[in-house]
Amino acid sequence: MNSLFPVMVGGAVGAGARHLVGQAMLARFGPGFPWWTLSVNIVGSLAMGLLIGLLARSGTGGETTRLFVGVGMLGGFTTFSSFSMEFWLLFERGQSVQAGLYVVASVVGALLACGAGMILIRQLPA
């Protein structure tokens, strides 16, 4: 039960942030392409890379932070289940090129962002 609380609170914060980003992106760009999911997955992956780098650097006291931020906040913020659904919606609407580009942009963008976060943290003085 001790580890559950930071995950639950972090998840609520992350899900709320995802909702706010989604609303803002939908209002700005409209419903034609799932920019909101793409952006939260890439930003969330960057944040995960930064978190991993910081926790690896500190070496101590990171379990509660990992649970709150990594499992809770970022788990609630990123949306790969939504990503999967949005891929199929694009595909079923006959937008197979957009669907394919969405997959490539999401996966490559998320991997690059996570790596960038780790590299950025390594560049900072200890």
Image (tube, grey):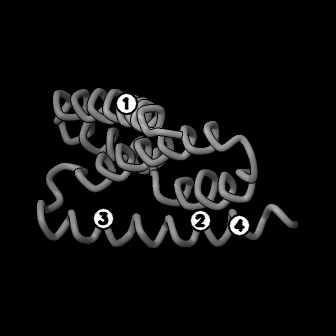
Q: Position of residue 75 (x, y in %)?
A: 56, 54
Kindly report the distance in space between the C-alpha atoms of the residues bearing marks 4 and 3: 24 Å
What is the secondary structure assignment of the residue under circle 3? helix
Q: Residue tagged by mark 4?
A: 6
Q: Position of residue 48 (x, y in %)?
A: 50, 44
Q: Residue tagged by mark 3?
A: 22
Tell me the mark number nearer the camera, choosing from 4 and 1. 4
Please identify the quadrant where the C terminus is shown.
top right
Tell me the mark number nearer the camera, choosing from 4 and 2. 4
What residue do we see at 20% from left, 42% from top? 93
Q: In this orientation, which residue lies closer to the viewer: 59 or 30?
A: 59
Please identify the quadrant where the N terminus is shown.
bottom right
Q: Quadrant of residue 28?
A: bottom left
Mark 3 surroundings within 10 Å by alpha-carbon count, few (fewer than 14), some (14 through 19), many (20 or more): some
* Type of amino acid at the residue the image marks with label 2: Gly
* Residue 28 appears left or right of 90: left
Kindly report the distance in space between the C-alpha atoms of the residues bearing marks 4 and 2: 8 Å
Verify CB contact (< 8 Å) between mark 4 and mark 1.
no
**Sequence-earlier tag: 4 or 1:** 4
